[in-house]
Image (cartoon, grey):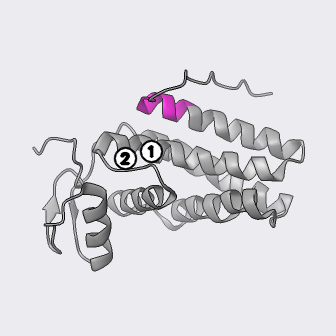
Amino acid sequence: MTTTPELPPPGVQSAEDRCQISRQLIIHAREELAVGSRLQAGEKAWGAVVQPMKAIAEQRGWPHQSHRDVREVLSQVALEYGFDYDQIEAMSQAYWIGHENFYENKYSTESLTAMIDRVEDVAPYLIELTTAQPRPFTITSNVQLRRLRRLTGNDRLEIGDTSPVGFSRNHPLP
């Protein structure tokens, strides 16, 4: 049996605390599934994806309190770091299968197992990104423009604008 990492104390969490919570949630997702708790298993897997994204958002000064905020952080980080299809699919399934199943109870144990497998594959990469420097990013579409205006609070951004720090509000420009 896998040893569950210690849960950090309550309150504002550091990036490492959020990574520890993510690792813990993956273990809990497997444990919940093993005892037949499909609702909890899916929600735990979704949480394992969300925690590193919240750490990245905090480091960049981006909002991350709502589902919309987290989805926009996920989208921006995926673009910035060039996530592949499997990585994007893992995060998408964590939401659409794991999180949605918590409310709707519509996915089978097999579907949840496959989703948790994908989350288990992508989570270490997401955790690794919490210590990575933001990458340069150029706004090339209206979708990106709206997302970055919302994340940064900067309504003066335009298509074609470039940031060497991924439009982070907290990382100093080189």
**Does residue 99 show up?**
yes
| Span of residues in magenta | 13-20
Label ID, residue 163: none
- Figure quadrant of the C terminus: top left
Residue nearest the observer in this picture, 107 or 118: 107
145 drawn magenta: no
The answer to whether the residues at label 1 and label 2 have Cβ atoms under 8 Å apart is yes
Mark 1 falls on what kind of element?
Answer: helix
Q: Position of residue 58 (x, y in %)?
A: 36, 41
Q: Position of residue 82 (x, y in %)?
A: 38, 62
- Figure quadrant of the N terminus: top right
How far apart marks 1 and 2 lie (CA) works out to 5 Å
Residue nearest the observer in this picture, 82 or 29: 29
The crowd level at tag 2 (other Cα within 10 Å; few <14, some 14-19, many 20+) is many
Residue nearest the observer in this picture, 72 or 174: 72
Look at the picture and state if 87 lies above or below 23. Answer: below
Q: Kindly identify which residue carries mark 1.
A: 54
Mark 2 falls on what kind of element?
Answer: helix
Q: Position of residue 28 (x, y in %)?
A: 73, 37
Q: Which residue lies at the image location 49% right of the left edge and 26% below the top edge?
A: 11
Q: Residue furthest right?
A: 35
Q: Kindly identify which residue carries mark 2.
A: 57
Q: Which residue lies at the image location 56% right of the left edge and 59% below the top edge?
A: 91
Q: Which residue lies at the image location 87% right of the left edge and 43% below the top edge?
A: 34
19 drawn magenta: yes
Look at the picture and state if 38 lies above or below 147. Answer: above
Residue 5 appears left or right of 35: left
**Does residue 114 show up?**
no
Residue type (three-letter) at the residue carrying disc 2:
Ala
Q: Main secondary structure of the magenta part?
A: helix
